[in-house]
Amino acid sequence: MSGVLRLDAVTKEYPRTGVAVRDVSFAVDKGEFVFLTGPSGSGKSTLLKLLSFAERPSQGDVKVSGFSSATLRDREIPQLRRRLGIVFQDFRLLTDRTVEANVAFALEVTGAAAGTIGTKVGRLLTQVGLASKATAMPHELSGGEQQRVAIARALANDPFLLLADEPTGNLDERATRGIVQLLREINALGTAVIMATHDLSLIMRSGYRYLELERGTLLYDGTDARRLTRHQ
């Protein structure tokens, strides 16, 4: 398989709520930055869950870095997850641990050598611009700073792919710009990024490829930002 991931005719149906994603196919290459957009309920979060193997498709195949939903065993999923970075809208930090302890935890649970953790945590916090906040608690940080900690944690295992589910949804405009710039810098270093967002102006300014979902169906896959003006 070429590229980072590929979806082939993927459908996800839930017993109670019905089809969330219908017959979706696309591929993402190494080092790409792709936006994922669509109204609430369009299937964005379900699609990201399929990419992280938090969900299995009802039909079709999801391939991520050589792992296939058709053949991957449940016990192998942690092996894949160690190669993914995942960032959520609500940060999901450990509120009783410092900034550096939150990032260190991601390394500890994957068995990183104890002697290397401190150095790597320092490097990651420097990368996201929070070296001076290492001993702060999450509640002492702004929303943008908390999301930077979450991104540092997601980068702990050097992922080839970063999945960001509405990472700026709880942030003001200034913090949003900072987070998007950080994700661009991460992408420039070679990590593929898929970012779900409702912020159409952000997509339009970027010039990046975007995937537009509606009612679980992939309506558009490309870079023509003029299409989005009809939604403004």
Image (tube, rainbow, N blue to C red):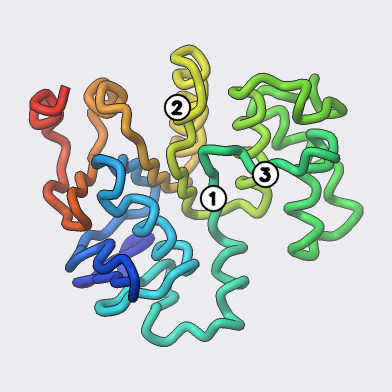
Side of 200 where 145 appears, left or right: right
The furthest residue to the front: 16
The local secondary structure at tag 1 comes to strand
In the rendered structure, which amino acid carries the disc numbered 2? Val
How far apart in space, not on screen, are marks 3 and 1 (Cα)?
9 Å
Q: 146 and 114: which one is in front?
A: 146
In the rendered structure, which amino acid carries the disc numbered 3? Arg
Q: Position of residue 59 (x, y in %)?
A: 26, 79
Numbered circle sitting on residue 153: 3
Q: From the image, tell me which residue sits under label 2.
A: 180
Q: Is residue 84 above or below residue 11?
A: above
Residue at screen point 85% across, 51% down = 116
Quadrant of residue 202 in the image?
top left
Numbered circle sitting on residue 86: 1
Q: Position of residue 110 (x, y in %)?
A: 74, 63
Residue at screen point 25% across, 63% down = 21
Q: Position of residue 55 (x, y in %)?
A: 44, 70
The local secondary structure at tag 3 comes to helix
